[in-house]
Amino acid sequence: MATDAAATKFQNPADFRPDFHQEKISSATSYDGLHFWQYMISGSIAGLIEHMAMFPVDTVKTHMQAIGSCPIKSVSVTHVLNSLLKSEGPAALYRGIAAMALGAGPAHAVHFSFYEVCKKHLSRDNPNSSIAHAVSGVCATVASDAVFTPMDMVKQRLQLGSESVYKGVWDCVKRVVREEGFGAFYASYRTTVLMNAPFTAVYFATYEAAKKGLMEISPDSVNDERWVVHATAGAAAGALAAAVTTPLDVVKTQLQCQGVCGCDRFKSGSMGDVIKAIVKKDGYRGLMRGWVPRMLFHSPAAAISWSTYEASKSFFQNLNRNSNSDNVT
């Protein structure tokens, strides 16, 4: 902002030609100068890298939250990790990663592109509006969860380990359709949306506010530290949002893993019934099972995701600028 003002102040009036082309560029810049498909590719890359890098932590969280007669009952991250490594070795931490790969890319492509489009329209009058950022995040998660929930369910069932009855992704998909019906893939969708709506509201609002604050602290070196800004803001946003929504994440895991590895099967998909079952079996602490690995997942995952996403956007911005320059010449 300061740089733009300075450039305007010292600009030679004779060189200033306000025409439609300049207005078009300014308009494009306010939307980062990217096409919709470029947001989708950037988001897809960010989602894949984020989830692949943090998948072992997600596996530990799933085991901790799958309350029932499952092999691992301890709420200690160390005990869960040691048990997995002793029983099956490091490969156990990556069980179900193929399902994650199939779901994360498309889901994050939808997520980030919807967020950018909604943010463009909702924050037109006030680019720094936290409400606009929060609402945009909620809209993005409703759309992306519709894409990701089926593969997330498959992923969590496979994560439960060698006692799972499924041989792989496609075997799980076929057996679920045959034995439980297509609706089983979306048994947790309502809970997932109810969890991710406040998660993304807190997440995006915190991210945008933290990013703005960090950039204001060191405006002169913001270009050199841009990836640090995005990573730091993303980590703070991910940790806070994860802590707030852990109880709903436990409910989601129970619904997605019901009937697998000794976990309870629920007659209805009511959140109230699941919460009552968890509290009855494990007390109110059961609703916070897995909060440590969940925060350990989302904090660095958000840092990885945002820094990768912004780097991808910068790549496309440079590509578009070079393309525009070639067209002008």
Image: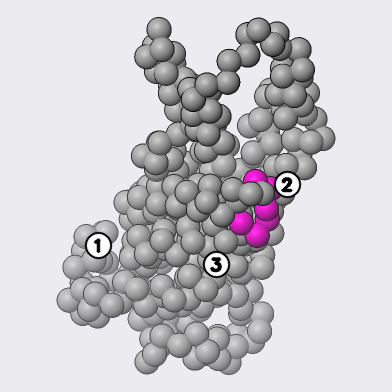
Q: Which mark is residue 191?
A: none
* The C terminus sits in image quarter: top left
- Residue 12 in view, yes or no: yes
In the rendered image of this protein, does residue 119 appear above or below residue 329? below
On the image, numbered disc 2 is attached to which residue? Answer: 210
Q: Amino acid at mark 3?
A: Ala
On the image, numbered disc 3 is attached to which residue? Answer: 197
In the rendered image of this protein, does residue 268 appear above or below residue 27? below
- Graded by Cα atoms within 10 Å as few (under 14), some (14 to 19) or many (20 or more), the crowding at tag 1 reads few
* Mark 2 or 1: the one toward you: 2
Q: CA distance from mark 2 to mark 3?
A: 20 Å
In the rendered image of this protein, does residue 148 appear above or below residue 313? below
Tell whether 120 sits left or right of 3.
Answer: left
The mark nearer the N terminus, 2 or 3, is: 3
Q: Which residues are magenta?
A: 127-132
Q: CA distance from mark 2 to mark 1?
A: 44 Å
Report if residue 82 lies within the magenta region.
Answer: no
Q: x, y percentage for residue 109?
A: 40, 47
Q: Amino acid at mark 1?
A: Lys
The foreground one among 39 and 9 is 9
